[in-house]
Image (spheres, rainbow, N blue to C red):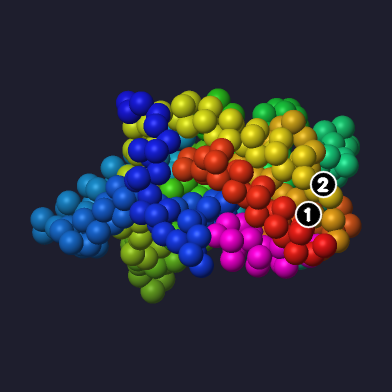
Amino acid sequence: MLKFNIQNIRKDFPALHQEIYGKPLVYLDSAATTLKPQVVIDAISNYYSTINSNVHRGVHYLSQQATDAFENARNTVKDFMNAGASKEIIFTKGTTESINLIAFSFGKKFIGKNDEVIVSAIEHHANIVPWQMICEEKGARLKVIPVNENGELIIDEFEKLISDKTKIVSVAHISNSLGIRNPIEEIIEISHKNGIPVMIDGAQGIVHEKVDVQELDCDFYCFSGHKLYAPMGIGVLYGKEKWLNEMPPYQTGGEMIQSVTFEKTTFNKLPFKFEAGTPNVADAIGLEAAINYLQSIGLEEIYKYEKGVFGCATKKLSEIPGMEILGNSSFKAGVISFNLENIHPYDAGTILDRLGVAVRTGNHCAQPTMDRFGIHGTIRASFGIYNTKEEIDLLVGALLKVKEMFG
């Protein structure tokens, strides 16, 4: 394990070392996508330069090497999440496709007329719309866990929502728009006492804390590689084998087929039943490289360092006059969402960009969250392994310039 050294870590990320409008880049948009370390870029390049081939059914050398690399990546993800078996790891395009897979496949088998699905009031659209669509199709009902003024889920109200019609609960590990960590352990425990499976949207969660799916006892957990320093276009759906075996395929063709006649088709075993067509081999290998990179530094060291940067940012931003931070909870990580009094988020974000500071503005694909707090959007600063307290000072200085420009 390497000794945690922020300057050495920053050297690993080539995109950091550039100027924006003549200013050093301060990248504070990791919740949208993280920058990539050189080892990940090299892993992808190496695949295409050497063993580029389709996987599983080829008998030639390159195909066998590609297959081994692809399945090794699956095993690495399995170990990283502590899944019970590699067949419980499904490669997808990302969190969005993973949730759509569950909503379609689980919904097709287990959700019927007048049944209920529970989500929370602070979900990303990707964990709302797929459930809305399956509920509309099946004549089921979508129920919503409310949040308090701090953006925290009201667990007592969640328990009241549960009925004998509840078929699944689907909530975020950490809110992408507020940075609040939901009490997923309690949600899973309450749901399971009532015989209800739980899906966790881990897009923002797995990057900021260790995830052990067996310890959590969640039924499904999904995340996107590109938020974990891996490439875009690769994601993971973990599912308990008992559920995945009972669920019908999400897409058909190619890898998920066992046999086909014009009279009947039979489907492949797990995990291939849910991986139709040619998989994203290169980016699965890139995801493995990202996981290995993080583990080489030390996950606990990373989380400890990030917590320090996040605490510094929260303190210094809260001291800016006219600052309103959305989601004032002690259970937060990775994201600070805020507004400056009488300044539109888009205007502020545009000026910050000219000062070399990359943040995100808008509703963050969480319009119901914005509606809950009576606003149209926020400025969102989100943090990664490469951010420093000095960059927080640059952000604060840039925000003070924004305030000065708007009088």
In the picture provided, is 406 more to the left or to the right than 8? Answer: right
Question: Disc 2 and disc 1: Cα gap in Å?
Answer: 11 Å
Q: Tell me the residue at 26%/53% (across/down).
A: 42
Which mark sits nearer the N-terminus, 2 or 1?
A: 2
Residue beneath disc 1: 339
In the picture provided, is 204 more to the left or to the right than 404? Answer: left
Residue neighbourhood size for the residue with mark 1, other residues' Cα within 10 Å, grouped as few (<14), some (14–19), many (≥20): many
Furthest-bottom residue in view?
Answer: 262
- Disc 1 residue type (three-letter): Asn
- Tell me the quarter of the picture where residue 392 sits: top right
The label on residue 321 is 2
Q: Is residue 57 above or below residue 73?
A: below
How many badges with numbers are in the image? 2
Q: Nearer the viewer, residue 132 or 379?
A: 379
Q: Is residue 226 above or below residue 304?
A: below
Q: Nearer the viewer, residue 183 or 197?
A: 183
Q: Is residue 200 visible?
A: no
Which of pointers 2 and 1 indicates the residue nearer the eye?
2
Secondary structure type for disc 1: strand
Where residue 133 sits: x, y (%)?
A: 71, 65
Q: Tell me the residue at 72%/53% (across/down).
A: 400
Q: Is residue 352 above or below residue 327?
A: below
Where residue 18 sits: x, y (%)?
A: 41, 59
In the picture provided, is 46 more to the left or to the right than 25? Answer: left
Where residue 65 sits: x, y (%)?
A: 17, 51
Q: Tell me the residue at 18%/61% (across/down).
A: 49
Q: Which residues are magenta?
A: 343-360
